[in-house]
Image (cartoon, rainbow, N blue to C red):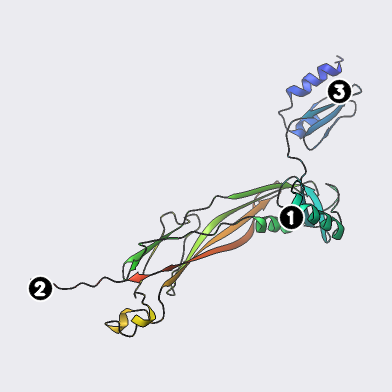
Amino acid sequence: MVRSPGAWLAVLLLTAAATIAALATGIAGADEGCVPTETGLECTIDGTTVTIVVATMPPIRYLATGDVNGRCWYWSRYPPGLDSQNPAHADLIEVTQTLLPECGTPGSVTVSVTTRAWQVFRSFTLARPEPVLRPEVGIANLPTLASAARPATLSHTERLPDGRTLEVHASVTRVRVDWGDGSVDTERAGTVFAAGAAHPYDLKTCAPEDRPGSPPAGRCHPTLSEYAVRVTFVWTARYRIGGGWITLGAIERSQTVLHDVDEIIGVQVRR
């Protein structure tokens, strides 16, 4: 049976939800076969070229840099990179293209995926913890509770200059708390301050002028007016290029808050 170009188009449209690879191999009768494009297929059928769009992709917009036998630049649909739609980046784009060679067209070069994944990871805005200490003024020998909201996982997807798709994810996998008195807690991976972390202080903090005459002398910390509580998020990244996830590495972000610790002294009252 011989179908008209219009009939072939109807057949193609009915199968447009399938994968590009399946479409390219599953349509019989095309004069020159179907060629996958970035957004779908282009088929030549009975002398008529039919273009089928099965995916919508953002326009090429960002000038990124990679390491392909040396530093080079290429255009990307996704950040990070210099934004061609941002007038403030125009001069930087021109300078980059002047100083560095072009990486090449997709499929013509080999990209260091790990290097590019690290570039993406470092470009993420990795949130620092915002610690909350309770009570606001600690009490010696009673626990101080430290907590911090967990940030959302960060994700990035881009097409590399060699045509492969790179995905990078980053999330907080551990939280470390330096309580400022020599004690350090590291939360297990996955908990990330689900219930906070608690720590009791043995000594209260005192201003320098109060330390020598504090009764008795041993109740004040000998050198500290406040404890510097340092909370650290350990951000861990992983990446993949179509296969399984590969752990990339970790970057830390920290925040320090000062914590005053007082004491409660029982006093006997005679009636």
Q: Nearer the viewer, mark 3 or mark 2?
A: 2
> What is the secondary structure assignment of the residue under circle 3?
loop
* Residue depicted at x 86% and y 29%: 33
Determine crowd level at label 2: few under 14, some 14-19, many 20+ residues with C-alpha closer than 10 A: few
* Left or right of 189 on screen, residue 57: right
Give the side of residue 158 with respect to residue 144, left or right.
right
Residue 137 sits in quarter: bottom left
Earlier-in-chain disc, 3 versus 2? 3
Q: Which mark is residue 113?
A: 1
Residue that lies at the very extreme toward the left in this rendered image: 271
- Identify the residue position indicated by label 2 in the image: 270
Query: Which label lies toward us, 2 or 1?
Result: 2
Helix, strand or loop at label 2? It is: loop
Whether residues under marks 3 and 2 lie with C-beta atoms below 8 angstroms apart, the answer is no
Which quadrant of the figure contains the N terminus?
top right
Marks 3 and 2, how far apart in space?
Answer: 106 Å
Residue 30 rendering spot, x and y as whole percentages: 87, 25
Location of mark 3 (residue): 29
Dot 1 amino acid type: Val
Q: Amino acid at mark 3?
A: Gly
Residue 48: percent from left, percent from top: 89, 23
At mark 1, the secondary structure is: helix
- The residue most toward the top is 1
Q: Is residue 135 left or right of residue 23?
A: left
Q: At 66% from the left edge and 52% from the top edge, which residue is drawn?
A: 239
Task: Give the image location of residue 176, x and y in percent.
Answer: 49, 64
Q: Is residue 25 visible?
A: yes
